[in-house]
Image (tube, rainbow, N blue to C red):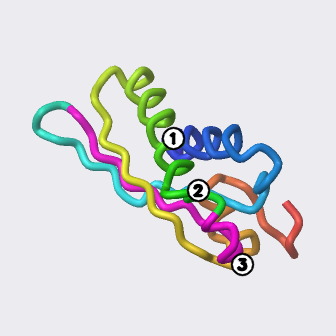
Amino acid sequence: MLAAETTREKLTLRLHQELPYQLTVETEAWEERKDGSCKIDQLIYVMRDGHKGIVLGNKGETIKAVSIQARAELEEFLGRRVHLFLQVKVRPNWLEEKERYSEMGLDFRDGNI
């Protein structure tokens, strides 16, 4: 969850007000490697196709910058090398998925948290 929030923070800082509440990040896999490093696969979910282009940026420059910044912060926090892989997918109703809130320890009733 910490890794996902780190990436989300970097996205928010980079995108400013363009997509403040329209995206979320999930850590899909975390693999410990023999060399002491870790591999983290994350999915960035956006609500619309147009948002995907904003997150990726011109020639991938936005997602690359976010990845570099998030990786650096995670490496500093964890004290080891991090291999961070980001993918962007459209998921229109992710805000209404009860499971998302349960995983965070929040209670979801009738759309109110």
Per the image, label 1 sits on a secondary structure element best described as helix
Whether residue 1 sits left or right of residue 86 in the image: it is right
* Camera-nearest residue between 5 and 13: 13
Q: Residue furthest left?
A: 34
Above or below, 25 against 51 in this view is above
Whether residue 52 is in magenta: the answer is yes
Reading the image, the residue beneath label 1 is: 65
Q: Quadrant of residue 57?
A: bottom right
Q: Amino acid at mark 1?
A: Ala
Classify mark 3: helix, strand or loop: loop
Q: Earlier in the sequence, mark 2 or mark 1?
A: 2
Query: Residue 18 — which label?
Result: none
Image coordinates of residue 36 in percent, x first then y, are 18, 31
Residue on which the image places disc 3: 93
Give the extent of the magenta segment: 37-53
Sequence-wise, the earlier of marks 3 and 2 is 2
Mark 2 → mark 1, Cα distance in angstroms: 10 Å
